[in-house]
Amino acid sequence: MKAQIDLLRKTVATWQEQVDYEKRILGYADSAHVAVLEMNKNRLAKLEGAMKVVKPRRANTYCFTVNNTEGGKGEIENFRKECKIFNAEERIKALKEPGYVPKVKKIAVYGRLGKDNPNAAEYRAANKGWRNAYARIRIEDAATLDVYCGTYVKETLTYGGAPFTHYRCIGA
């Protein structure tokens, strides 16, 4: 499929050159050439779209995965600092502009055991496989770490006359 996409990209580029040449020299482009160009562009868009949707992700807040080493933990700390700066800038906007609702970025780090992890025995039940498929893996036991970052909006809601604060996720 990748070869088809590459060939179609070359075809689109060739037809685009032809149409541009006609517009430059004649002042107009042949309608048949323009139609062929548009048809090839649409076919290319469909093929590229089919390549992109290989396996949809379950969480739209997933950011990246790092190894559970000092280097990986350093990347997570740098990402946390970026999010802290974003949150501070949002608070400043809220102070300057009345009525502005600041967004808050929250980070979650989850461990994954990986292949042949010696700590996997702690997470298995005796002779039954995995104890809980949705168990949280401790950071110390994990081989890799998944980092999730969600953007939230703070809302104050009332329930039975009593106000409470709620953070609503608006995406990644």
Image: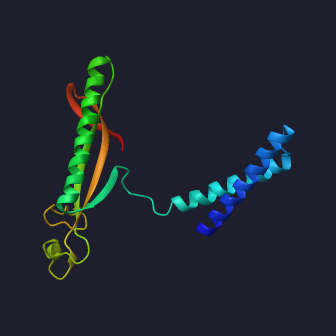
Whether residue 26 is situated above or below residue 33 in the rendered picture? above
Q: Which residue does the image show at 19% across and 66% down from the upper left? A: 142
Q: Residue furthest bottom?
A: 127
For the C terminus, give its image quadrant: top left
Q: In this view, does 34 lie to the left or right of 170?
A: right
The spot of residue 74 in percent (x, y) is 20, 53
**Residue in the foreground of this view, choosing between 60 and 93:** 93
The spot of residue 31 in percent (x, y) is 85, 45
The spot of residue 150 in percent (x, y) is 31, 44
> For residue 48, what is the image quadrant?
bottom right
**Residue in the foreground of this view, choosing between 129 and 91:** 91
> For residue 133, what is the image quadrant?
bottom left
> For residue 121, what is the image quadrant?
bottom left
For the N terminus, give its image quadrant: bottom right
**Residue in the foreground of this view, choosing between 54 and 136:** 54
Whether residue 105 is situated above or below residue 131 in the rendered picture? above
Q: Which residue does the image show at 38% across and 50% down from the upper left? A: 60
Q: Which residue does the image show at 16% across and 71% down from the upper left? A: 123
Does the image show residue 88?
yes
The spot of residue 16 in percent (x, y) is 73, 50
**Residue in the foreground of this view, choosing between 108 and 58:** 108
Q: In this view, does 87 lie to the left or right of 31?
A: left
Does the image show residue 40?
no
